[in-house]
Amino acid sequence: MKRDVLASRRSFSPQRGFTLVELLVVIAIIGVLIALLLPAVQQAREAARRMQCSNNLKQIGLALHNFHDTYGNLPPGGSRTGHGGYTWGTFILPFIEQPAVWDAILEESGNYPPDPTGKSGSIYCGCHQYGVWTTPGPEATVLEAFICPSDTLAEVRPGSDMGHQCGKANYAGSLGHGHGSDNGFFNRFITSIRSLRDVTDGLSNTIAIGEAGGGRLAGAPDGENPTYPVWAGSPKGGSGTALTHWGPLREAWHGVPINLSNGGGPAGDPASWDKGFGSLHPGGAMFLFGDGSVHFLAETINLDAYDNLGQMNDGEVVGNY
C-alpha cells in the first residue's frame, strides 16, 4: 500500500523545467539557424529581383525591334542636333503598352511634338523646363518597365521645381567606347540614326542597353545631380553647361568598369562623372544585347572584351565573357 502511495505521488509530481543553461543553448541554436537562413532568404529575394530586371530588359528589347519594324530605324539617343530633347525611352512608349503617356506628351508639346522617326529635330524635353511647370508633366509618370527592383533611388526624381520631377529609369543606351566615339548602339544626337544593319559585329555580340542607377559611392545621384537616371530625355539649357552637356543618364559608355559608381558619380566637377553602367545587383549588372537576349555581366569582366561588346562595328567579335 505504501509503495502505491509513493508511486502515485511520483506520477503527480511537477515535471522539471528548463534550466538557464538549457534555455541559453536553445536560444543559441535558434540564432544559428536564423543566421544560416537569412542569407538564403536574401539571395532568393535578389534572384527574384534579377529575374524581374531581366524581364524588363527583354520587354525593352522587343519594343526596340518593334519600333525598328515600324519606322525602319532604331529610336535616336537624342532628338535634337544639340544637347537636350527626348530620347529612346520616350519613343518606345507605344511599344511597351504606354500609349496614354505618349499621347499626353504629344498634347503637352502642342504644335511641335517629338518626332518618333528621329529624322527631324523636336522640342526640348518638357520634363526639364525649369521655372515653367507648376505641376509635374507626363514625364514624371512612374513606369515599372524602366525600373530595376534592386535600385534604391526614388521612383520620381526629386526637385523643388515641379517640371524637374521625372520618372526614374534604370536602363541606359550604349554609346560605345566613349563620348564622341559614335560606335555604340545609340548616338547621343540626332545626327546619326541607327539601323540594325549598321551593327556589323552582329546583334548577339553588341550591347544595346545596360543598367544604370543608384551608386554605391558617396556621390550617388540625387535630385540636383544631372546624372539622375530618367526615361524621358535630356534637359534644355545652354551649350556647355553641366546640366545640359551631360544630362540625365539616358546613355552610358563602356570605357569604365561596370559598377565603378553604378552610373552615378561624385557631385561637383562634371568631368568626374564616369557615365558608366552599373547596378546594385551583387557582382555585376544586367545587359540587353541587340538580338534581344539579356546577360548578366560580372564587374570583373575583361575591360577590353567589355569595351568590344559595347561597340557595334569595331570588327572584334568577343567569345566567352
Image (cartoon, rainbow, N blue to C red):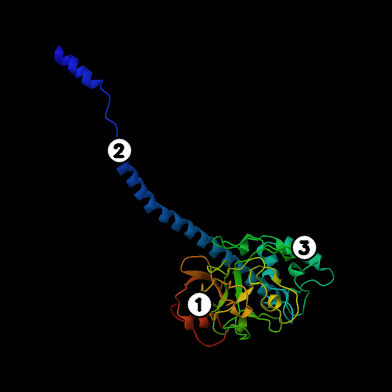
Q: Is residue 312 above or below residue 250?
A: below
Q: Quadrant of residue 8?
A: top left
Residue 81 x, y percent position in the rendering: 74, 82
Q: CA distance from mark 3 to mark 1?
A: 38 Å
Q: Quadrant of residue 67?
A: bottom right
Circle 1 crowding by C-alpha within 10 Å: few under 14, some 14–19, many from 20: many
Q: CA distance from mark 2 to mark 1?
A: 54 Å
Q: Is residue 108 above or below residue 236?
A: above
Identify the residue under disc 3: 104
Identify the residue under disc 1: 257
Residue 200 x, y percent position in the rendering: 57, 85
Q: Give left or right: position of 262 versus 42.
A: right
Identify the residue under disc 2: 20
Q: Nearer the viewer, residue 86 or 193?
A: 86
Q: Amino acid at mark 3?
A: Ala
**Quick one: quadrant of the N terminus?**
top left
